[in-house]
């Protein structure tokens, strides 16, 4: 964990339950590669630097996002109150997972569903799943070209 002593003090001061402490530790550990690349604690970064990390790290489920974001925002507030050098309110301006992450995950889920569906249909019709998928892609590409 980057800046482990500071984060451990926050966890001791902030958390009242083992579950919250575990979530906080997990979130801080997930941020470690970003903090290492910045060579700075997340409480010193602005919104533009933090949003891509948030989009990559946090889960899509709203409950998981809410708890993780709450802990991160409380950590930044705590850092500001403790007068940590260069602490700023960048995290306080963060949104939940950005639209790019939602779009990426939804498209990939749709693609998996589509490929499974085409594979099942091909097996029922005694054709190669690869042939069915290639055929669908050709039809879809012609429709896209036609409409664009």
Image (cartoon, grey):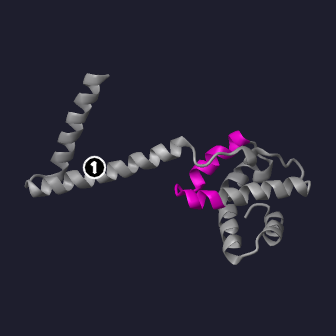
Position of residue 65 relative to residue 137, above or below, is below
At 33% from the left and 48% from the top, the residue drawn is: 111
Give residue 5's quadrant in the image: bottom right
Give residue 116's quadrant in the image: bottom left
Element on which disc 1 rests: helix
Is 49 one of the magenta-colored residues? yes
Foreground pick, 148 / 132: 148
Q: Position of residue 18 (x, y in %)?
A: 70, 77
Q: Residue furthest bottom?
A: 18
Q: State left or right for residue 129 relative to residue 145.
A: left
Q: Position of residue 40 (x, y in %)?
A: 78, 51
**The N terminus lies in quadrant:** bottom right
Q: Does the magenta stretch mainly form a helix, a strand or a loop?
A: helix
Which class describes the residues within 10 Å of circle 1: few (<14), some (14-19), or many (20+)? some
Q: State left or right for residue 119 relative to residue 86.
A: left
Q: State left or right for residue 38 relative to residue 144.
A: right
Give residue 8's quadrant in the image: bottom right
At 46% from the left and 43% from the top, the residue drawn is: 103
At 85% from the left and 56% from the top, the residue drawn is: 79
Q: Residue furthest right?
A: 83
Is 89 one of the magenta-colored residues? no
- Residue extent of the magenta highlight: 47-67
Position of residue 127 relative to residue 28, above or below, is above
At 18% from the left and 57% from the top, the residue drawn is: 120
**The C terminus lies in quadrant:** top left
How many numbered badges does the structure rendering display? 1
Judging by the rendered image, the residue that carries numbered circle 1 is: 114
Q: Position of residue 99 (x, y in %)?
A: 53, 42
Foreground pick, 32 / 124: 124
């Amino acid at each position: 964990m980057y800046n482990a002593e500071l984060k451990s003090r926050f966890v001791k001061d902030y958390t009242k339950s083992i579950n919250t402490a575990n979530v906080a530790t997990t979130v801080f550990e997930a941020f470690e590669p970003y903090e290492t690349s910045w060579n700075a604690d997340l409480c010193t970064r602005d919104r533009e630097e933090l949003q891509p990390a948030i989009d990559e790290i946090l889960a899509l489920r709203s409950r998981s996002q809410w708890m993780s974001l709450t802990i991160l925002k409380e950590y930044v507030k705590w850092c500001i109150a403790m007068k940590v050098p260069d602490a700023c309110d960048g995290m306080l301006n963060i949104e939940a997972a950005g639209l790019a992450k939602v779009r990426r995950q939804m498209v990939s889920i749709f693609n998996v569903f589509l490929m499974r569906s085409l594979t099942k249909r091909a097996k029922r019709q005694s054709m190669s799943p690869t042939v069915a998928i290639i055929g669908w892609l050709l039809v879809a590409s012609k429709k896209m070209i036609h409409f664009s």
